[in-house]
Image: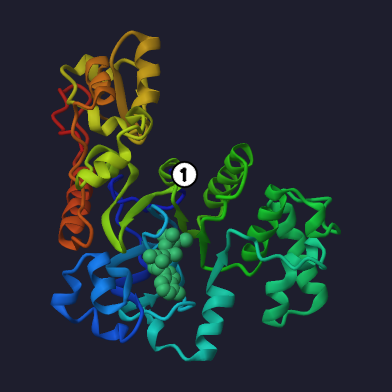
Amino acid sequence: MSTVTPSTGTAGDTPAAPVFCVDGLWKVFGPKAGRVPGDPELTALDPAELRSRTGCTAAVRDVSFDVRKGEVFVVMGLSGSGKSTLVRCLTRLIEPTAGTIAIDGEDVRAMDKARLRTLRRHRAAMVFQHFGLLPHRTVLDNVAYGLEIQGMRRAERRERAAEVVAKVGLEGLEQRRPAQLSGGQRQRVGLARALAVDPEVLLFDEPFSALDPLIRRDMQEEVIRLHREEGRTMVFITHDLGEALKLGDRIALMRDGRVVQLGTPEEIVGSPADDYVRAFVRDVPREQVMTVRTAMRPAASAEEAATGPAVRPDATVSEAIEAVARAGTPARVLDQGRCLGVVDSTALLDVVAGGVAAPPAVAAGSRAAGAARVAAATAAERREPAPPTATTSEEPV
Ligand SMILES: Nc1ncnc2c1ncn2[C@@H]1O[C@H](COP(=O)(O)OP(=O)(O)O)[C@@H](O)[C@H]1O
Ligand SMILES: [Mg+2]
């Protein structure tokens, strides 16, 4: 999804400061778990071998990533791949076995109990799959619950709760109890409760998995809307690829506790890091994920750079196909009035057919590659616009 704040890097923006920095994180369950991360012989074992040799499960294995301010960072993987363990480690609802976690530069693993409480109550609020609503309380009081724990006075917290209830579309239902609500409404209450404390980061652990498809889509739209309006940083866990592609600015794809690829939806779909990821994304309609940058070429003439329908650099190939089909000419990719290049029907259809490579994927943990990619994108973005009379010689970025 596009955001109000610069966050994806591929758009050429300077990445915003990270909220969470996770480096070399391990969570091993089982006897003498602490010996596993530092033992090369044990870490080389596959999950089943490790379990039979040591009785340990490595739920999170040497995971590193940053969550940038204002982005929706999605962690995706099949059931059992380590997503819940990972997100719970972020606020130490589960104690990590090894590695570092920082929030705004502060070492989470060094926090004492009081500091941790502040972290969980004020800074990183969690939205759970099973809502965790209090059955005997009204909607309003459920939403105010987190504020109550914070010690906010009754009148003030009810006023704040009423605001958030309206924000998530539950106006008029303030006095109902959870049993009198639909599943989707209950999930909105859970969301409102997390929002009420105005956290810096919202953490979602598969919040919509139990919802009917249509309600689920509503809730996804709700998250997109909230994100667009508030620019709030979100970490969103899901096992659903469609949901990940729809919501994520960047996606970390997990398998057996490891991050096998970390990138934008376009990078993951366009340049899968390995056969596992390739199999995962095989059925994704590429034209709905890949942007026109993938298919762009320099304008062939000044005339081509000055005529034809305009599309944004982050428009999808699908949107551009529509524009090109309607106009009957190539479309210009315009960024603030400046022509970055053109896309024609051949190049666009090539993307649909899978023939055009996306920008190089960033392998998990490869920070240097990530930095290089961002630097390249930023440099390309800084290039001077071609004079309107000249043929534009810019490379697609
Ligand atoms: N408390 C625990 N004790 C032992 N193993 C656990 C525990 N919690 C999770 N696991 C194991 O860790 C792995 C990852 O689990 P989890 O993080 O829940 O995955 P996901 O959320 O992706 O479905 C699984 O193999 C699971 O069985
Ligand atoms: Mg889980």
Whole-percent x and y of residue 21? 33, 71
Q: Is residue 132 left or right of residue 136?
A: left
Of residues 157 and 132, which is closer to you in this image? 132
Quarter of the image holding residue 368?
bottom left
Q: Please name the residue shown 31% across and 39% down the image.
A: 281
Q: Is mark 1 within 8 Å of ligand 2?
A: no
Asked if residue 250 is positioned above or below residue 117 in the image, the reply reads above
Whole-percent x and y of residue 58? 31, 71
Of residues 387 and 43, which is closer to you in this image? 43
Q: Report the quarter where the N terminus lies.
A: top left
Quarter of the image holding residue 216?
top right
Q: Please name the residue shown 35% across and 33% down the image.
A: 284
Crowding near pointer 1: few (<14 within 10 Å), some, many (20+)? some
Q: Please name the residue shown 51% across and 84% down the image.
A: 116
Whole-percent x and y of residue 334? 32, 30
Query: Is residue 51 visible in this depiction of the protein?
Result: yes
Asked if residue 284 is positioned above or below residue 321 in the image, the reply reads below
Quarter of the image holding residue 64?
bottom left
Of residues 90 and 302, which is closer to you in this image? 90
Q: Is residue 218 left or right of residue 85?
A: right
Q: Report the quarter where the C terminus lies.
A: top left
Q: Residue furthest right?
A: 175
Q: Please name the residue shown 46% across and 57% down the image.
A: 237
Whole-percent x and y of residue 47? 27, 66
Q: Residue furthest front?
A: 52
Query: Is residue 86 visible in this depiction of the protein?
Result: no
Q: Which residue is mark 1?
A: 243
Q: How is the image coloured?
A: rainbow
Q: Which amino acid lies under the numbered mark 1 shown in the image of this protein?
A: Glu
- Local SS, label 1: helix
